[in-house]
Image (cartoon, grey):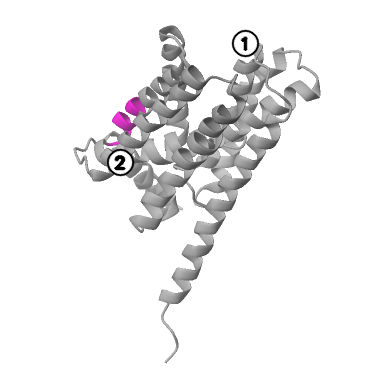
Amino acid sequence: MAGNGIGLKQTISDGLREAVRMRWNPSKDLAIVVGSYLLLVAVLYTAFNVVTSENVAPYFILYGPVSLLLIGVVLPVVWNTVLKKRPLADTGITKKHALVSLALGGLLGAVTYMGTLAELELPAFDELFPLLMMAITVGLFEAVFFRGWVQLSLDRAFGAIPAVVLGAAFYSLYHIGYGMEAEELLLLFILGITFAVAFRVTKNILVMWPFYTWIGGLYTNLEEGLSIPFESAYGFALVLVSMFMFIGFVLLKLSRDGKRKAPQPG
């Protein structure tokens, strides 16, 4: 028992030392991350402030398939896992600490729900459902892009604490693409710190999704009286399914590649 206690203390001590250790290791990876971030903000700004939602088809294409799917999920996974041959865990997609991540995400989600959606009178189903599908899809995109892609890349380059602060800043400022103002960006920075710290506990996107981050997004949209056509739900559902299909395809490919490389009997 004493040995187990010493081992646990050592594990905690090692974890704390790793969390506070600073690094200076910027690389080509970080340049790709920053470039993808700037591209994302530019595309979102074009969709929301140039094309606008009045032009339904081009607006949705730029927002859903291009921003959320291609830039938000496909690009990070292709760069990290397909091109650089790293595990999907380097993008926050992992089975490691899955149950702990889901439990923590569920707890944070419940607390967030009690302070947000529980206090609202929800609209009718045909108004609520498309907003719900949008929030869930955007929630997965933000988990992969801002936590698994941006934050973990910053962590490898500078260490955990700078990654939390810089990741929160990236998360806040990306809302410029939506046309948000300075006061809102400050609140989003504080929220981004919360997200970043929660994610850093397990480095698994299951802390963020499916129980946590989308709740605040749905609450904000309902508070602001946002209304989108019911048919939008089908579009966001298609983007969400495409995300899962792409990740599933990569997992299958990795599994097959691993079996080919495994030592064969003589």
Marks 1/2 in contact by CB < 8 Å: the verdict is: no
**Relative to 204, residue 196 above or below:** above
Mark 2 = which residue?
Answer: 32
**Relative to 256, residue 220 above or below:** above
At which x and y percent is residue 252?
Answer: 53, 63
Instruction: Looking at the picture, tell me which residue is in the foreground, 187 or 20.
Output: 187
At which x and y percent is residue 184?
Answer: 46, 11
Q: Is residue 18 visible?
A: no
Residue count near mark 2 (Cα–Cα under 10 Å), binned few <14, some 14–19, many ≥20: some
Number of numbered labels in the structure image: 2
- Amino acid marked by disc 1: Glu
Q: Earlier in the sequence, mark 1 or mark 2?
A: 2
The residue under the point 41% across, 12% down is 186
At which x and y percent is residue 196?
Answer: 43, 30
- Amino acid marked by disc 2: Ile
Residue count near mark 1 (Cα–Cα under 10 Å), binned few <14, some 14–19, many ≥20: few
At which x and y percent is residue 17?
Answer: 29, 39
Q: Is residue 208 left or right of residue 27?
A: right
The residue under the point 42% across, 45% down is 75
Over which residues does the magenta segment extend? 159-166
- Magenta stretch mostly in which secondary structure? helix
Task: Examine the image and state in which quarter residue 155 appears.
Answer: top left
Residue ranking furthest to the left: 24
**Regarding mark 1 in the picture, which secondary structure is present there?**
loop
Which quadrant would the C terminus be assigned to in this image? bottom left
Mark 1 = which residue?
Answer: 224
